[in-house]
Amino acid sequence: MTPKVLFAATDTAWQEYEGHLGHALAAAGIEAELSPEAGPPETVDYIVYAPSSKLKDFTPFTRLKAVLNLWAGVEHVVGNQTLRVPLARMVDQGLTEGMVEWVTGHVLRHHLNIDHALSHQSGEWVRHVPPLARHRPVTVLGLGALGAASAQALAGLNFPVTGWSRTPRDVAGIDCLSGPAGLEEALARAEILVLLLPLTPGTEDLINAAHIDQLPRGAVILNPGRGRLIDDDALLAALDAGHLGHATLDVFRTEPLPPDHPFWAHPKVTVTPHIASETRPDTASEVIAENIRRGEAGEPFLHLVDRDRGY
């Protein structure tokens, strides 16, 4: 039987993905019926899903084999009580490459003090020589696919990298810590802190006043992970007090970031508009097609979400 695949996302996303998904399914040897219209829900085998979709009730989809998330983040769907089939998050090489480039670029920007150089083109010959990378400790919170890849890229540039995760991980070339005591040590080391944790009840507001106080004075925070990992008020207070040197933020509690938000005008905050890593339709379609192939072959799905952990 030809599997029926529902694309549950925006019209714009469908226009971007239709051709790529069709090509990827054909390359995987899958002849599927792909549509943005559900038709009779009891005939749908797979749902390619964006959490921004209007689809919230999965109960009518009685033949459903899996929901394949278009985004890396699943916090807006993982708690849906009507979803009782396997949920796969997006782990895409293009997404990973984009995140590594953003993280590496901004770590180097702060390490080399490029902002200072750009703002002091006055004709005065003042030399500010940065330390070597091996003398600039970096901590990455979150050692999933994006965190591990970013940490290893930084270690490849000779930064001493500490990685932290809630449960023990082993990433080659990275000093991996875990648990509450490990978090304290990881923060205490971080001249540059990179946040790549998933958003769960256990990570929301993790970077609060108490944890910010554990960072070295002058530390820089980079957040391309989730906006709600940070207590915004605590962050602003630490920047104003001089405890933190800068924050470069790509994700926010409210997106788009409101024009009157204090982050926009703060001299120690850089805003990038959620561009650190974007799912690329061509490579993401290959991941989706492989999971559909696996489902049809009776093989285990890739990148399944652990409902208890929330990611």
Image (cartoon, helix red, strand yellow):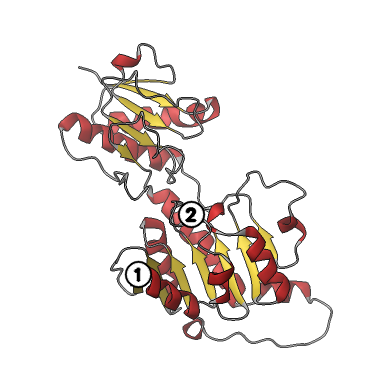
Question: 196 above or below 75?
Answer: below
Instruction: Give x and y (percent) for residue 87.
Output: 32, 37
Residue toward you, 19 or 184: 184
Q: Tell me which label, 2 or 1, sits earlier in the chain.
A: 2
Residue 197 horizontal side relative to residue 65, left or right: right
Q: Residues within 10 Å of mark 1 (few under 14, many from 20)?
A: some
The residue at 57%/59% (across/down) is: 230
Q: Quadrant of residue 55?
A: top left
| Amino acid at circle 2 | Gly
Q: Residues within 10 Å of mark 2 (few under 14, many from 20)?
A: some
Residue 98, which numbered label?
Answer: 2
Residue 195 horizontal side relative to residue 241, left or right: left
| Amino acid at circle 1 | Ser
Instruction: Give x and y (percent) for residue 211.
Output: 53, 70
- What is the secondary structure assignment of the residue under circle 2? helix
The residue at 36%/56% (across/down) is: 145
* Location of mark 1 (residue): 178
